[in-house]
Structures are given as C-alpha cells and as structure tokens.
Amino acid sequence: MSRQHMGLRIFYFSIVTVVGVVIQLLVSSTGSVAASLISASVVSMIVQGLWRLSDPDSQSFTHQLVPAGGALAGIVIATLVRFLQYGIHPLNWAAIPVALFTSAAAIWLRPKAHSEVCFQHRVRLTTVFECPRCRQKFCGKSDCWNSRGVRCQRCQQNEVPVFDLRNDHWWTKRFGKRVTSGSCMKCLSTAANTQVHECGQCHWQMCRRCWDLDNGQCRKCGWMPEGLPEPLRVLIAPTRAVPRRSSRTVVAGQGRQQR
Ligand SMILES: [Zn+2]
Ligand SMILES: [Zn+2]
Ligand SMILES: [Zn+2]
Ligand SMILES: [Zn+2]
C-alpha cells in the first residue's frame, strides 16, 4: 500500500472518530438509552457504507477495520465524555458492544457480495470475462483469456465445445438442415462423413466442430444464428454491431494485435 493510501486511511479514521463523537454526544444528550444505542449502530453502519463507496477495491480485512475502528473510537470517547461530565445510565455503555457488533456484522456480510475472482489468477475482478465454455470467470489477461477466440486459455487448449455437437434439433433450429453435398470449408471433412451446416447468410459451410470452434460465427460474413448461449452473445455482440463489410477486418485486426 502506498503512503498516500495510508494517509488517507488515517485521515478517514480521524474524521469518522470526530463525527462519531459529535453524533453520539448529541444523541446521548437527549438522555434516551435507546436513542444512543440506535445511533451507535447507525453510525457504525453508515461509516462502513461510506468506506465501501470511497474505496471499493479494499478487500482485505485490515482495511475494513479503519471505519469500524473509527466509529468505535468515536462512540467510546463520546460515552466516556458523557459519563465523566454527567454520569450516565449504566445501559448507555451497551453502545460500545452494539457498535462492535454492527461493524463486525457489516464486515462479515461484505465479502459475499463481491467475491468474484479470476479463476486462474485469483485476483478480484473489475471486468468480468465469463468463459462461454466452462462458465468460469476470468480477468482477461492474455495468459488466462483468449480474447480472439472468446474463451479461456484452458478451454482453448482442451478444445472444450460450447455447443452440444450431437443435438440435431438444436443445430437444425439455428443453422437449418445439414448439408448433404460438398465438405466443411475449414477442415475439409466431407458432408457425407460429418454433419455440415451452411451459414444463414452466405454460402459458407462448415462441420459442427468447426462452427463450434468459431463460436457459431461465420468467418466469411460474420453472421451468427439466433439463440446462442447468453455468455457467447454478450461477448461477441460488439463486433456484430459494426456494418457487415468492415466487421470482419475489425475482428481480424484485433485478433492479430492481441496475439
Ligand atoms: Zn473456459
Ligand atoms: Zn486472469
Ligand atoms: Zn470442419
Ligand atoms: Zn456467412
């Protein structure tokens, strides 16, 4: 952590403490025990919430202790001051465990909401790439994510399919009936031996395996059938928005740069 971050945390801690003291003193001056307990809890919660907004990247437990500690310090000081000045109802001391408990609960509940990490690098994800093949999430670095192939490097290496190659109904519905003549224009297997389907827009034809390897997108005209799996559609969508002619060159150009 940089010095700047450290300074910021100390600053925030002090602000929180001061604000906590002021609020707690104001509330306890009403003399109501319930009000001071509620305010101890509310102050702890608000402080924790603001901390998250100001520093959404802080995932570590120690960083969470900054707002919790600040709020707690504020409440302890306020209760002490009040006690020394006027004497307080003994139940007012309960504000301290209430603050502790609220902060602990807030910290404990937090990680579940943002626990997405890269399947390979174990770093917290800011941009999520969900692999359409294994459905794991990745950070998008070139050694975990193949952006050209729209899949993770493991699925690339193991040639994990994204479509069910044997589900005839699925293929017919999206690509139309299998072609009986000619051959796959990519791997050259004949239509007699493998199931070959034609592009819905041009006459490019490929076997199911090659369509799968190309994410169901025609390499000649960029066409894709309707009803492809959601993660695939989401990741490929931007290139489809580009006018058809130029889209292919854009995709190819990007791919080369990212290699
Ligand atoms: Zn994968
Ligand atoms: Zn990664
Ligand atoms: Zn093929
Ligand atoms: Zn096509």
Image (cartoon, rainbow, N blue to C red):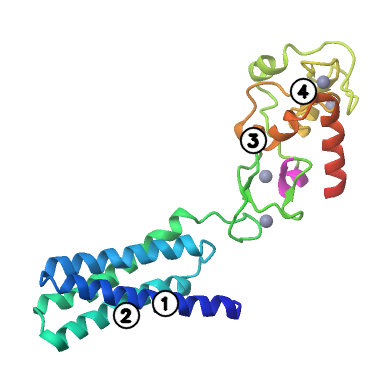
Which residue is the extreme one toward the bottom? 84
Q: CA separation, marks 2 and 1? A: 9 Å
The amino acid type, in three-letter code, at marker 3 is: Val
Q: Nearer the viewer, mark 3 or mark 2?
A: 2
The answer to whether 223 appears left or right of 57 in the picture is right
Disc 1 or disc 3, which is closer to the eye? 1
- Where residue 180 sits in the image (x, y, percent)? 83, 10
Q: Quadrant of residue 33?
A: bottom left
Specify the quarter for ligand 1. Answer: top right
Can you say whether 202 is above or below 140 in the image?
above
Q: Which residues are magenta?
A: 150-158
Measured in 3D between alpha carbons, the distance from the residue under mark 1 to the one under mark 3, in whole angstroms, is: 42 Å
For badge 1, the amino acid type reads: Phe
Relative vertical location of residue 146 with respect to residue 181 in this rendering, above or below = below
Which residue is at 39% across, 61% downward? Answer: 49
Q: Residue at the location (44% across, 74% down)?
A: 12
* Nearer the camera: disc 4 or disc 2: 2
Question: What residue does disc 2 label?
Answer: 73
| Mark 1 burial class by Cα count in 10 Å: few <14, some 14-19, many 20+ | many
In the picture of the structure, the residue carrying the numbered disc 3 is: 234
Q: Mark 2 is on which residue type?
A: Ala
Of callouts 4 and 3, the N-terminal one: 4
Is the CB–ligand 4 distance for label 4 below 8 Å?
A: yes
Identity of the residue drawn at 75% across and 33% down: 239
Residue 31 locus on image (x, y percent): 10, 72
Q: Residue at x 61, y 61 (%)?
A: 123
Question: Between 132 and 81, which is closer to the camera in this rendering?
Answer: 81
- Residue at which label 1 appears: 13
Q: Distance between the Cα atoms at labels 4 and 2?
A: 62 Å
